[in-house]
């Protein structure tokens, strides 16, 4: 297989360690960068270097370049509501919805016993400490409606139970724009449970 | 959408310029590198830096760190047979088959009029010059059996016609292990054309 120069093989191997990238895709990325202007490879290398300055917010554990992060530092965002998400990507998705005006807490990877991720690996103790600090009136658990997400939501609810703060969960149901006849049974039963009175 | 720190957005943008990588995949790559050990991001950056030393062989146009490339410099490989491939990836695929013992010529991107790639963009003139130099007894055109590949093969055959060197083409047909009933009509008719006498 060693038909590429060593430096190219090394780049292919490095790309191959990205999630979901196999040998063929890694080859495609490497050869694309070799065929294109060298500026593109340099820019990617520089971006990788710059990213080492990114840290996690000591309050909410989101990715940030400044501590506290812009959301935690924003006086216009309600500090009494904490939305608990599993990853920075979930936080990004919530933010792009543009309606939530409270703060966040990133667990950074949900509970996944098969992958060896237990409660001690997630930042739930930090969340409990934040809530214990006072001033929090609601914790919204925004985990994905998957087995892992459900387990994580239960864990968060248990960890916060003795603090007397209401813990709510995102409403799960039929997504906007979806066709009812193509929805799976579990989503339909969830949407039935979370039905609301029409106004 | 700007909910990631600027350095993370920059990395996402850089990944997003790779072929077939959209916003979500680029986010996944960037966040994977941020979650994992920083060694991984550094290794990718270093591999990108090292790849700038890779050049193309002045004889066959394959990617190489030394000129001539190891294949052109190998005295055990038959210099009288040239296998013409479109890209270094195609050369790599041919080499991994392990049966070809001649030399190569990489056109570096086939003919694709829709993408503005004409004969002058490919290295077919260099191939013709190589053949004109003498000592070549066969040119095997190993382009993909696609519209672009066919056009490239025709172009190569035309460019070499006045040199009086036999130009052959890879046999196209049913791939080994494939189920005949799932083969498309064109592949079947090709395999019929390239039928061989059983021994």
Image (tube, coloured by chain):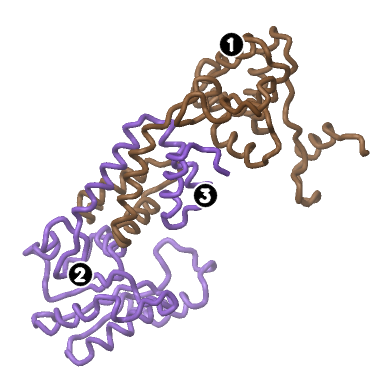
Chain colours: A brown, B purple
Name, please, the residue furthest toward the front. A75
Image quadrant of residue B81?
Answer: bottom left
Chain that bears disc 3: B
Q: Please, which residue is most extreme toward the bottom here?
A: B162
- Disc 1 target residue: A129
Question: Residue A29 in the image: x percent, y percent?
Answer: 37, 54
B160 left or right of A81? left
Residues at marks 3 and 1, CA–CA distance in whole angstroms: 35 Å
Q: Which residue appears at 41% of the width and 80% of the height? A: B113
Labels 2 and 1 within one chain: no
Residue linked to disc 2:
B104
Q: Which of B138 and B46 is in front in this view?
A: B46
Up-down: is B167 above or below A92? below
A157 vs B73: above or below: above
Secondary structure at numbered mark 2: strand
Label 2: chain? B
Front tag of 2 and 1: 1
Which sits earlier in the primary sequence, circle 3 or circle 2? 3
Spatial distance from mark 3 to mark 2, Cα to Cα?
Answer: 38 Å
**Taking A192 as reference, is A65 left or right?**
left
């Amino acid at each position: 297989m060693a038909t590429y120069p060593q430096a190219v093989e090394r780049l292919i191997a490095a790309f191959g360690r990205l999630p979901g990238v196999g040998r063929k895709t890694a080859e495609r990325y490497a050869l694309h960068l070799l065929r294109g202007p060298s500026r593109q490879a340099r820019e990617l290398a520089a971006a990788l270097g710059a990213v080492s300055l990114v840290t996690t917010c000591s309050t909410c554990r989101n990715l940030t370049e400044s501590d506290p992060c812009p959301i935690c530092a924003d006086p216009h965002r309600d500090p009494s509501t904490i939305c608990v998400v599993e990853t920075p990507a979930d936080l990004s998705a919530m933010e792009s919805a543009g309606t939530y005006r409270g703060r966040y807490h990133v667990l950074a990877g949900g509970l996944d016993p098969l992958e060896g991720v237990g409660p001690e690996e997630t930042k739930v103790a930090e969340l409990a400490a934040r809530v214990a600090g006072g001033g929090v009136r609601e914790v919204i658990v925004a985990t994905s409606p998957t087995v892992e997400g459900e387990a994580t939501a239960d864990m968060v609810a248990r960890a916060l139970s003795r603090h007397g703060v209401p813990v709510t969960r995102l409403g799960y149901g039929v997504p906007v724009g979806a066709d009812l006849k193509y929805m799976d049974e579990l989503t339909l039963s969830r949407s039935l449970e979370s039905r609301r009175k029409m106004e």
